[in-house]
Image: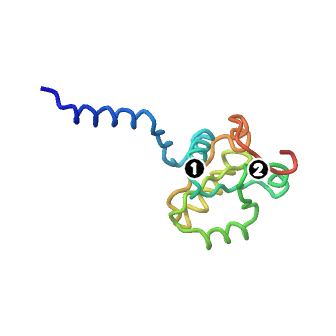
Amino acid sequence: MSNPEAEKISEIKDTVTQVLPIPPQQQLPVSSARALKDRLDWGEPALTILDARDSEAYLEEHIVGAMSIASDDLVERFVNSLAKNREIYVYGDNETQADAAAEKFRTEGFTNVSQLQGGLAGWKAISGATEGRVA
């Protein structure tokens, strides 16, 4: 004997499963530009993108919404104003620069800090949006 109501519920569940998008991968200590873009496209605004390059590079072009941490004063301001569990993505001119900036936040007790692999070039390679003088 089949149960028409149970079959209908099963059919609805299958349809919903096919329609609902799959959430992007959660933050990792080192993230690809694609992983960050997927999270932004998904609509996760509760994260912060920090640019560790010098001020001139930042003004030329940076990831849309990124904030500059080119000086120790700016780093200190963010350290004092952001919640320690805030999700932070850091990028620089190279992996060493991004690593150093990310480590500053980790040593201050931030628990969700990720270095963006490839920096701005990696972001642009996946057609990530930028702003600044060049963009």
Q: Dot 1, crowdedness within 10 Å: few (<14), some or many (≥20)?
A: few
Q: Nearer the viewer, residue 21 or 69?
A: 21
Q: Dot 2, crowdedness within 10 Å: few (<14), some or many (≥20)?
A: many
Query: Taking 9 as reference, is 109 left or right?
Result: right
For mark 1, what is the residue? Answer: 43
- Mark 2 element type: strand
Q: Amino acid at mark 1?
A: Gly
Q: Is residue 123 above or below residue 44?
A: above
Q: Nearer the viewer, residue 45 or 18?
A: 18
Query: Taking 16 as reference, is 41 left or right?
Result: right
Q: Residue furthest left?
A: 1
Dot label at residue 83: none
Q: Earlier in the sequence, mark 1 or mark 2?
A: 1
For mark 2, what is the residue? Answer: 62
Q: Amino acid at mark 2?
A: His
Q: CA distance from mark 1 to mark 2?
A: 20 Å
- Mark 1 element type: loop
Point out residue 65 in the picture as x, y percentages from the top left corner. Answer: 71, 55
Point out residue 130 in the picture as x, y percentages from the top left corner. Answer: 76, 46
